[in-house]
Amino acid sequence: MRVLIVGGGGREHALAWKIAQSPLVDEIWCAPGNAGTASLAQNIEIKAEDIQALAELAERKKMDLTVVGPEAPLVAGIVDLFRERGLTVFGPSMEAAQMEGSKSFAKEIMLEGGVATGRAEVFTDYDSAAACIEATGHPYVVKADGLAAGKGVIIAQDDKAAYQALKSCFIDREFGTSGEKVLIEEYLEGPEVSILAFVDGTHVLPMAPAQDYKRIDDGDSGPNTGGMGSYSPVPVLTPEDYARAVNEVLYPTALALMKRGIHYKGILYAGLMLTKDGPRVLEYNVRFGDPEIQAILPRLRSDIVEAMLAVIEGKLEDVNLTWTHEPCVTVVVASGGYPGGYEKGYPISGLEESNSIQGVTVFQAGTRLGNQGEVLTDGGRVLAVSALGEDFALARENAYLGAEKISFQDMYYRRDIAARAAGVT
Ligand code: AMP
Ligand code: GLY
C-alpha cells in the first residue's frame, strides 16, 4: 500500500513511525512532514490546509490510503472531497468534524445522547452573554465556538476577566468567525484525561488513555501551549471510570450522531475531567491528540493500518487492540520563548544518541532539514522524547535521559512530566 499522511507535526511523525511498521505498507508520503518524517517517508511541500492539492496528489500518486493528522483540513471537508474522488481516506466527514469545529454543535450532540458534560449556554452577542455573567458565579469558562488553535478557552477568575474574554470574542474579534458564537460553561474540577477511540459509525474501539500537560511551566503554571508532555496509561483513571467513559460517553455520542444521520468514522477524542460526580466531557477532538499519541503509539502492539481500514469499511467489530503493559512517558522539548516568540533555525544535536537509549523514540515536530542534511529547529514544539519502561519511574527516567542527550540553543522542557504517576512528588 501507498499511504499519504497529512500534516507535519509530532503527531504525524509518530503516525508515520507506526504506519511504517505495518506489513501492509510499502511506501509512505507526508505532506508537508518534517525532518523526522523524512527518514520514514517522502515529504512533499503541500500544506495540510491545501485540500485540493492534496486530493490531486493522492490521485496522481495512486495513494491507497490517506490519513489526516490535523483538525483544520477535516473541518474544511478533506474527507468529503477525497470520497467524491473515490479516494480512501481515514477521518470524519466535514459534518462529523463539527464535533471539534463547533463547540455548540458538540454540546447539542452530547445533550441528545445524554452524555455527562458541563452545563453551558450559547450566545451570539456581547450584551446577552454579559447578562449571563451577572447572573452566575465565578470562575467562568468562556469558550469560542469554532477552531482557535487551542486558545479559544478562557477561564476567567472574576467578572472583569469574564467581560474581557467576551470582549475579545465579540468586539475585538480575536478569534475571527470562531468567536461569533460563545459558550459560557459550568466550571468543572478534577484531573483531566484523554480517551481516543477508533469509531466506524456504530462501533467504538478505545485506545489506552493518556494525560497531557497544557501549561508551559512546571506545576501547571504559565500560559497554555499545544502540549508539553504526556503519558499513558493514566493511574488516576480507575477501570470503572474508563468503562463509564466508553459506555456513557463515547458510545452514546456515536449513537446520537447516527440519529442525525452522521456516520462518524475516524478518531473521536474525548477530553474528560474526572469530577467527584464521575467523568464529564470538556471537549471533543476529531483526530489523534498531540502529544498524547506520542505516548500511546509506542505502547500499541497491533497494526494501526488494519484498525484504520476497519474503520473505513465499517468492520471495527473484528478488530482488537493489544498493548504492552509498559507505561510510556513523553517529554516535549520546545524552543525557548514558546508559546510566545522564539527563534528558528538552530542546529539540533544528540538525536541519534537519544534514540539509541533502550525504550526511547524521539518524535520530531517543529524541525526541518538544512542544506547539509542537518536537523534544524523550525517551530515552537521541536521534539517529543517518548520512552517506555517497566514502570512509570523507569519510563520517566528514560524519557529525561533521552531529553538530556539532545541539545540546541535555548531549548526548554518541563521537569515534572509524569512525576505524580511515577510517585516522585
Ligand atoms: P479545551 O480546548 O476545551 O480542551 O479546553 C482547554 C482547557 O481548558 C482544558 O484542558 C481544561 O483544562 C480547561 N477547561 C475547559 N472546559 C472547562 C470547564 N468546563 N471547567 C474547567 N476547566 C475547563
Ligand atoms: N493535546 C491536545 C490536543 O491534541 O488537542
Image (spheres, rainbow, N blue to C red):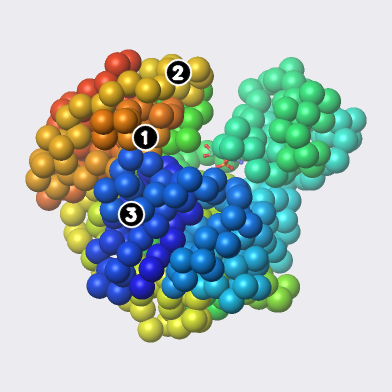
Question: In the rendered structure, which amino acid carries the disc numbered 3?
Answer: Ala
In percent of width and height, residue 218 lies at: 35, 23
- Between the residue at mark 3 and the residue at mark 1, the CA separation in whole angstroms equals 14 Å
Dot 1 falls on a residue whose secondary structure is strand
Left or right: 291 as drawn, with respect to 60: left
- Between the residue at mark 2 and the residue at mark 1, the CA separation in whole angstroms equals 16 Å
Residue appearing at x 51%, y 28% in the figure:
224
Image quadrant in which the N terminus is located: bottom left
Question: In the rendered structure, which amino acid carries the disc numbered 1?
Answer: Arg
Q: Is residue 100 visible?
A: no
Q: Earlier in the sequence, mark 2 or mark 1?
A: 2
**In this figure, which residue is indicated by the disc labeled 2?**
342
Q: Nearer the viewer, mark 2 or mark 1?
A: 1
Question: Which of these two is toward me, 368 or 288?
Answer: 368
Residue appearing at x 41%, y 29% in the figure:
378
Crowding around mark 2 (Cα neighbors within 10 Å: few <14, some 14 to 19, many 20+) is some
**In this figure, which residue is indicated by the disc labeled 1?**
368
Query: Residue 301 occupies which quadrant of the picture?
Result: bottom left
